[in-house]
């Protein structure tokens, strides 16, 4: 592929003997006790673009972030990332504990064709912290005067972005370099866009969405856009999001569960859920039965039999069977959010069974979101899924119809 939405990929550029700055997203889960990487999925996903640019003879410099001021325990050096990248890429990757200072500049200028250098965590720079982004509202044109771009941009012939997972960030490393350098999208970024277009732009029918988890705000923005576009033939609701739709449709889910919905501040979504149910009849489905704890065992309960002391922890057996039937007939499947409290073995059945149905389905499948990926890895052979997105916030915003700063910036550059 060469162009998606006016975005140029690296096949459109000439990189031999050129100095290339590559922005990736290798932000990884960190063990709080050891400070070591727990899961390197994003590192593995970045390999193809790094290999391609190096093989093309680029003098390649990689910038990336890890953690943030709001996630301070994960705000660590990228030294371990460099080692893992080198092992995955199959080539030496140099690392320097500097970003844009004299030592980094000297190191960049000494690179030879095909060599690779990873700079340290760009979140060490205040202008890359999310708190800075939230408080100081900058346009990309203003960012050319920031420290990172003033120091690094003159050293490079081209900029490549392969960080779709950070596409919703309006930071200098994501949208500023496009103002001053020829810019391209990496392989991962293009693959993410292709997968998302496959489920939003004329998807194979029937197209179903399975939405769950506890992040109601993310889900409702997505639901509104999907319904408006007509891209979903069926939306299967699970988790806390599904409970909101039950309440909206007049189901008494009991004082305990309704109280938790209210405690989370999700009452605000009941009215929109009612509108969706009224305006798009037959498209949205919620559980016909639920699983709760009775004594020390899992019990299936019909909606009419829910009592005030019950906490709804999973979808019930009948719902699992009904949803699996829909999944088996689908030609396009998108998943975001587990079905219940899957971390508890007593309530893993819904998530485990549905995820295996998705993995075994003939339809084109896409999953996204940290909890979705984690639970898929736990219960299935994730290689059976057609596309696993690295993104969380960016994915939700894209499917909610919100313009992503990265896509706007890189399209403008093209």
Image (cartoon, grey):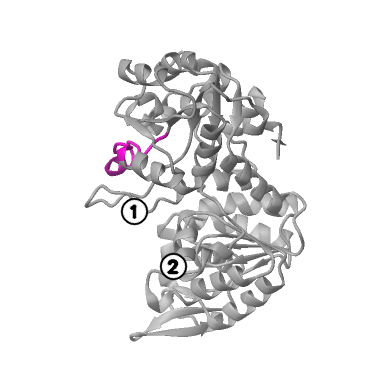
Give above or below for 353 relative to 85: below
**The N terminus, quarter of image:** top right
Give above or below for 299 relative to 33: below
Give above or below for 104 relative to 78: above
Query: Which residue occupies the foreground of this view, 247 or 35?
Result: 35
**The C terminus, quarter of image:** top right
Query: Which residue occupies the foreground of this view, 31 or 258?
Result: 31
- Element marked by disc 2: helix
* Predominant SS along the magenta part: loop
Q: Residues within 10 Å of mark 2 (few under 14, many from 20)?
A: few
Write down the quadrant of residue 412 in the picture.
Answer: top right
x and y percent of residue 302 in the render? 54, 83
In the rendered structure, which segment of residues is drawn in magenta?
64-79
Write down the quadrant of residue 303 in the picture.
Answer: bottom right
x and y percent of residue 273 in the render? 61, 59
x and y percent of residue 318 in the render? 58, 83
In the rendering, which numbered label is found on residue 378?
Answer: 2
Q: Residue at x 43, y 23 (%)?
A: 136
* Left or right of residue 337: residue 264: left
* Left or right of residue 234: residue 137: left
- Element marked by disc 1: loop
Q: Residue at x 43, y 70 (%)?
A: 342
Query: Which residue occupies the foreground of this view, 155 or 393?
Result: 155
Q: Are marks 1 and 2 in contact (CB under 8 Å)?
A: no
How many angstroms separate mark 1 from mark 2 (CA)? Answer: 14 Å
The residue that mark 1 highlights is 38
Q: Residue at x 49, y 18 (%)?
A: 143
Q: Residue at x 25, y 47 (%)?
A: 35
């Amino acid at each position: 592929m060469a162009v998606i939405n006016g975005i140029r990929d690296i096949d459109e550029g000439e990189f031999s003997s050129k100095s290339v700055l590559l922005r990736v997203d290798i932000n990884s889960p960190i063990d709080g006790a050891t400070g070591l990487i727990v899961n390197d999925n994003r590192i593995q996903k970045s390999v193809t673009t790094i290999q391609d640019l190096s093989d093309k003879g680029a003098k390649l410099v990689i910038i990336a972030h890890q953690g943030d001021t709001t996630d301070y325990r994960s705000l660590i050096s990228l030294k371990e990332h460099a080692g893992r990248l080198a092992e995955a890429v199959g080539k030496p990757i140099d690392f320097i504990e500097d970003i844009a200072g004299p030592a980094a500049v000297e190191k960049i200028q000494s690179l030879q064709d095909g060599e690779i250098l990873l700079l340290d965590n760009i979140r060490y720079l205040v202008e890359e912290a999310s708190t800075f982004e939230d408080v100081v509202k900058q346009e990309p044109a203003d960012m050319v005067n920031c420290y990172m771009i003033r120091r690094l941009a003159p050293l490079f012939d081209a900029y490549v972005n392969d960080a779709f997972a950070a596409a919703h960030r309006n930071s200098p490393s994501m949208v500023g370099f496009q103002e001053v350098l020829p810019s391209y999208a990496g392989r991962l970024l293009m693959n993410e866009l292709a997968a998302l277009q496959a489920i939003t732009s004329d998807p194979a029918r029937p197209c179903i969405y399975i939405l769950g988890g506890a992040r109601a705000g993310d889900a409702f923005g997505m639901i509104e856009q999907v319904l408006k576009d007509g891209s979903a033939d069926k939306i299967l609701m699970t988790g806390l999001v599904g409970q909101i739709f039950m309440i909206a449709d007049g189901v008494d889910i009991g004082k305990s569960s309704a109280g938790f919905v209210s405690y989370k501040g999700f009452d605000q979504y009941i009215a929109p859920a009612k509108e969706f149910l009224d305006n798009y009849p037959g498209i949205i489905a919620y559980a016909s039965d639920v699983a709760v704890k009775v004594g020390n065992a899992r019990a299936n309960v019909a909606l009419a039999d829910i009592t005030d002391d019950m906490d709804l922890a999973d979808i019930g057996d009948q719902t699992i069977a009904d949803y699996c039937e829909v999944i088996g007939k689908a030609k396009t499947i998108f998943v975001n959010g587990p079905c219940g409290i899957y971390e508890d073995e007593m309530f893993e059945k819904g998530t485990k069974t549905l995820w295996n149905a998705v993995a075994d389905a003939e339809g084109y499948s896409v999953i996204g979101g940290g909890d979705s990926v984690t639970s898929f890895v736990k219960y299935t052979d994730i290689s059976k899924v057609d596309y696993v997105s690295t993104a969380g916030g960016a994915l939700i915003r894209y499917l909610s119809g919100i313009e992503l700063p990265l896509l706007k910036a890189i399209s403008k550059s093209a």
